[in-house]
Amino acid sequence: MDDSHRRQFLKISAATAVAGPGVLGLAQAAGTPPPAPVVADNPAAAQGVTHTLARYLVNARYEDLPDNVRKEGTRTLLNWVGVAVGGSRHETVECAVSALAPFSGPPQATLLGRHERFDVMNAAFINGVSSHIFDYDDTHLKTIIHPAGPVVSALLALSEYHPVSGKDFLNALVLGIETSCRIGNAVYPNHYDVGWHITGTAGVFGAAAGAGKILQLSEQQMVWALGLAASQPVGLRESFGSMNKSFNPGRAASNGLFAALLAARNFTSSDGMIEAKRGWARTISTKQDYREITEGLGQRFEAALNTYKPFACGIVIHPAIDAAIQLRNQYHLKAEEIAGVALRVNPLVLELTGKKTPHVGLEGKFSIYHAVAVALIDGAAGEKQFSDRAVTDPKTVALRDRVSATVDPAILPEQVDMTITLKDGRKLHKFIAHAIGSVEVPMTDQQLEAKFEDLAEGILTQAQTRKLMAACWQVAQLGDASQIAKAGVPL
């Protein structure tokens, strides 16, 4: 397909199914409410969704990506590699390595931050676990999907078996994340509210799409890959606070890769597994907005909206941590000066992070009470602040007991209203509209590098860390993307 025909195809794909984004944009700009969500019962909206997405994925090229999307894809890669290296020595990863080593196939792929090599499928799983165990990975805030875990874990493992250039790797990464987030948009929040862990359930599509792109699947094979991915939803929110939570993106990575490899050998599936009456979207969600999947393909990119965590815990706690650190630093606060901390939060915050007395570090990541206390004491909320030792520290526990949270539906999930009462009677107030690490207040490249260096400390030498970061930043110039995996092995 030449460039002119390719550009024409992308324009046609963007207008598939319903009125194009330009029409919706004009209506909203004029003050007219947008149309009601298109549900599966609308036959026109529910036709050809899987094929439309597959067609776009097969034809989309690196050259079609806008510069800002390429840059965000590179930042996503850097952040993911950092958290995967950082999590590589956690007991969760040790458990997985020990359990799977006797059954692993040929040593085909790297476990970042470790010396072991596993077969591609198990390496994808373990790197996915490692990258999520700290809850420090990327977040698509519209859906609370952590998109890189399933996608990049699958692609990096595959790159060591199936050579791929850095440009093609980055293109597959962006397309995989785009797939996860668009499909997630179509069912969020209903799908999430009922209890599914959307990182796993939507992430499997992204892993399949990205791997399928590297394997150069045909359109029909890509349809089958997406269909096989649809048959493997993984992850329930009940797992939060346990090792099982990081299992979900790891399994989504290996499941998506599994789907793409089967499809490459013409293992068939239904042609409408996403949108069919008994397909994925209608089976696991009461909301289906298929426009989110098909509208604006190649024109608007969900991958450009990815964000990165400055704090190693659930994203909904970040505004409270930001407020606590700002007040601590501004007034040079000491824990013993604080009589109480009162928070007004969105209902989702306590639903997800309302653990009053966490007993282990993984539970602490889902305790707004612990997070605020440790942020006020340490002025930080990195992985060290969510260790098993940190959540049982007497000083932290004592301050944690003086933190209270009240639900206020007027407070958005990305906001917090904090009032600290000091023992001398003074009241300190902070309202956070957008926390650091959000789309509105993004982490800088330098902050991402500092986070990476902190995570890699004690695992890689400083020289190795710099080399690995350079490989991530320069991914588009690499002749072989697997150089990134090789650079992530300790000396």
Image (tube, rainbow, N blue to C red):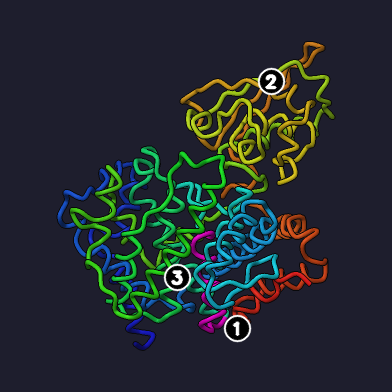
Residue 258 position (above or below residue 86): below
What is the CA distance from the residue labelled 1 to the residue labelled 2?
A: 52 Å
Determine which residue is flagged by label 1.
Answer: 480
Q: Which quarter of the figure has residue 313?
A: top right
Q: Magenta stretch containing residue 72, yes or no?
A: no
How crowded pointer 3 is (Cα within 10 Å; few <14, some 14-19, many 20+) is rated as many
Residue beneath the point at 37% across and 69% down: 259
Tell me, for residue 8, which label it has, or none. none
Q: Earlier in the sequence, mark 1 or mark 3?
A: 3
Determine which residue is flagged by label 3.
Answer: 210
How crowded pointer 1 is (Cα within 10 Å; few <14, some 14-19, many 20+) is rated as some
How crowded pointer 2 is (Cα within 10 Å; few <14, some 14-19, many 20+) is rated as some
- Identify residue type, mark 1: Asp
Which residues make up the magenta segment? 148-165
Question: Closest to the observer: 199 or 66?
Answer: 199
Does residue 344 appear to the left or right of 468 in the view shown? left
Residue 191 % position (x, y) = 35, 44
Say which element carries label 2.
loop
- Identify residue type, mark 3: Gly
C-beta proximity under 8 Å, tags 3 and 2: no
Determine which residue is flagged by label 2.
Answer: 401
Q: Which quarter of the figure has residue 315?
A: top right
What is the CA distance from the residue labelled 3 to the residue labelled 2?
A: 46 Å
